[in-house]
Image (tube, rainbow, N blue to C red):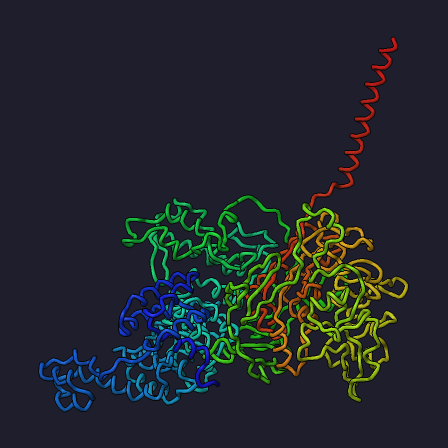
Amino acid sequence: MKSIAPLVLTWMFLVAVVFAQDPGCCHRVRTHPACQESCDQMALEASAAGRRQHLSNLRNNCPMTLTTFWQCVNTSAPDIWQEDTGWPGRQCCINARAGQCHAACMQASSFSETSSACLRHEEPSLFQCLDRFEKKEDCCRHAPVASQCRQKCEAIFDASTPTEEMSLDVSINCRSNGQTVIQCVENYTLVAIPARDPRDSLHCCERSHSSACKEICRRAHINLTSERDIVDSLLEACGPIQPHEGIWNCFFLNSGSQIAQDSPLPNPSAMDGAKLQCCQRAVSAKCREICVKLYSTSWSTKQSWNNFDEHCQYQPMEVSLLTCLADVQEPCQPGCSGLTYCTNFNNRPTDLFRSCSARSDGGAANDMQLWSEGSIHMPFMNIPVLDIAECESEMWKAIACTLQVKPCHPESHVNMICKADCIHILSRCIDHSRLTKGLTALGLCNILSPADRHAPCIPLTEYLDAGARENKNDEMTVPCHSDPCNNETTGFSGVCSINRGLCGYGQTCTQAKCTPGCRLGDASTFLVTRGSHVRLPESADNLACYKACTCSVNGILEHCQPLQCETMEPCTHNGQRREHGSHYKISCNHCVCFNGVETCSRRQCPINLDAHPDASQHYSTLPCKCTDQYVPVCGANGRTYPSACTAKCAADLEDNQSEFGTCDSFDNPCADNPCQADERCVVRRQVCLSINYADCPQYECIGASRHCSREPRATVCDTDGKEHFNLCTLHRRGKTLDYLGPCQARCNAVNQRQVCGQNGETYHSECAAWSDRTIIDYFGPCRAVGKRTENTTAQQCSSVKCPDPSVPHCIGATPPGACCPVCAAYTRVLYSKGEADRAAAAFGNKAVSVAEVLKGLRTIVAVAECDLYGYLSVEGDIVISVMSTIPSPSKTQIIACNKEAEKLGALINTRSPMVVSYMYLSPLLAASTTMVRTQIVPTAAAHTVSSSLGVLLVCGIMVIVLQRFSCGNR
């Protein structure tokens, strides 16, 4: 562990400043009003002592990510963190009873001088205070000056009655370099901290699903005083200890003392690596500190959670943190049905919810019952309301259900109620006679809802409509919706995904697969699949520093090694500053700033074709003004580019890093037999995200094992159309691989025909393209590139005949570089080559491939009727497509796939732990999604009727004409 985290040092020492010399520091944080206000207040102070009085507010309101602000602060002056001179025990002198003792105390410069002038038995309060300060000096002198450890140590002695919370602060902030401090403080708190009342954990009994367990739990907490006896009672009635589950988790969080060592309690220094990643998203330093404390140790207290509620949970500005934590605890899943109370939330198969369950349904009903008593209880305030049965009852119900069922905003996954709805209901239903003086409906909603009226939120009007919604739940299957891989009864936990390996192209897999996994830290419930490479914070000391680990077959994280810390530096473009992690557009290109590096898509921005009609025929949005002339080259990264121009521009390839010709036209990469003697070389084409520090081999070495059945099942098809259990079996039988997955009759030797994939590669059959996670662009070898890469539904290549639309009621979209529109939503993803290099270096210089990215993202797609495909585009970003597996999908199924693509984009944009916990997905930075639309297509019957009506109309007109003609002849 590092002695002192660099970022914490930066944060603490950069605060030292004389603001009178540079008030311009405050103007650099106009986007953070609270920070600017704290800064302005401090700037008015003339003395260092005066400025120190505002230091706490500045630390709470100015995030560490505002690096240039803190640098400005640092260069101004270094006096804020300098300690006041004088004897610290002088603060105790106010407790002296006798005037002579008080005077001597004020003139003293040490503890001994005071002791010689005052009698202990006559001045108990004075000496009790002096003893604390003497102990403070003895304990805290071992901690570095101006460190968090020193600050937390001093705080516990400054309090007349220290709390478990303060003791926990010391354990967390001093563990890297202050074991002497921790032990000294523990010896003090054993006497100073009063014994905990077991009834503080009484509420935990309600976490059990067993009525017998609940009853025994209640009796134990009321009648017993020893935690050892309470645990023994719970073991008998509630089953074995599961520290991360239900009643046990709550009990340990509320317990302040250790139980016998033979009880399998969580490790006091345990870490939740998934949720700890989220703490960096906190805006206020106070919230960040509380978050780190909660998720870097299992010994949290009830006060910890109360503080979290006050400073984080009910703070709209912390929406990024809260969304991140919710992704870990309750990921957004499509579909909601079967609710008996929140019935307006039923029959929404394509919408996303975090907690559509009978438990949440009952929770909403319970909330309404509590609110009907006339008050809404919150951790830091109570809101008095009128009779909700008479005042906007349906809206109150919608609020209760929204808070419990938790619908997800489609683009950001937030779950906050819109401010307009908050103001609407509180202005009508708040009980002003009981409202605290000075509070208003608007003031309360400023606390409870996003301040920005354009911020993402959940509108209640969507859930006020009591009209019956058509039940289309049977058109979609979500195998992992009920979380079948986590069984509280058996204790089994696994990562759930759709078992797509059982199905071939055009088939829908509806079975779930449970893969054993590893927890991201001893205190985490978040699982990653075994065999995967993951990243998690190296320690709680510096959230910008990560380590890379492998999830072993034993279910533990192994082979961990530190990664280079994130700098979180801003970017500058044309003199304009962009914060780390910010997304923005420069002209028509999407950009993201990450660790001081700006990454943008490379589209040639379109001209006004109306003003230049002659340019429309030849105009291209391909990067660097490359033409659409098709002269393919194979890049060293394994991708076939339509020209040397696009290879150089999109992938930054040098002239010696590409060769003319398609990648599949070059010699067999296994010809030189690059594998070991006991291995067999298999051609496995791949495209790599970065080749700066790692090669991109186009082959794979397969172990020549005699026990192929012991290896995982992964069905493959050989060139004779025969299936094999896995690659090992295929090679043991001396066969040649045709494509991955089950054999398909449509791709046998008789029916095979070449196809061009959207990735610009030619495949010998449709099945070979699909198994490479590539959507077919058109039939025949690749011979063109789409010259317009902006969102379009039109055919792009004049030399290509596009297939007839397979889904007439879908208006397809043409992804960048492709020629033909297809009924599939796609998400364009910007990635960091630096992060890709870092991931490669962490695991033996194995380059990150597009296939690995697609494999990781594919497990997140929750709808069985949708599947994921993708490729590296001619603009240098990754195109992720989500398309229905149904040959003729319904409108609901098309919308479902749209929503799955949008969901992936939201998880990438928020850098959710669901994505960035996996090492090979951590380079993904920003995403933008294009969804396909549906249209009404006349049915055959309607067409027949309209045709018949047309014939009758023509016949009628002819009759009238003939009649007039005959009359005229008379």
**Residue found 50% across the figure and 75% down from its top:** 544
Residue 869 seen in the current view:
no
Residue 835 seen in the current view:
yes
Q: Is residue 351 left or right of residue 626?
A: left
**Residue found 73% across the figure and 80% down from its top:** 711
811 vs 407, nearest the viewer: 811
- Percent position (x, y) of residue 231? 42, 79
View extreme (right): residue: 750
- Where is residue 864, by image quadrant? bottom right
Question: How many badges with numbers are in the image?
Answer: 0
Q: Compared with residue 110, is residue 164 higher up or lower down, i.e. above or below?
A: above
Q: Compared with residue 742, is residue 965 higher up or lower down, i.e. above or below?
A: above
- Where is residue 229, by image quadrant? bottom left
- Percent position (x, y) of residue 128? 21, 83
- Where is residue 909, by image quadrant? bottom right
170 vs 573, nearest the viewer: 573
Q: Compared with residue 206, is residue 542 higher up or lower down, i.e. above or below?
A: below
In the picture, the quarter occupied by the C terminus is top right
- Percent position (x, y) of residue 701? 76, 82
- Percent position (x, y) of residue 84? 26, 80
**Residue found 62% across the figure and 56% down from its top:** 588
672 vs 183, nearest the viewer: 672
View extreme (top): residue: 970
Q: Compared with residue 110, is residue 650 higher up or lower down, i.e. above or below?
A: above
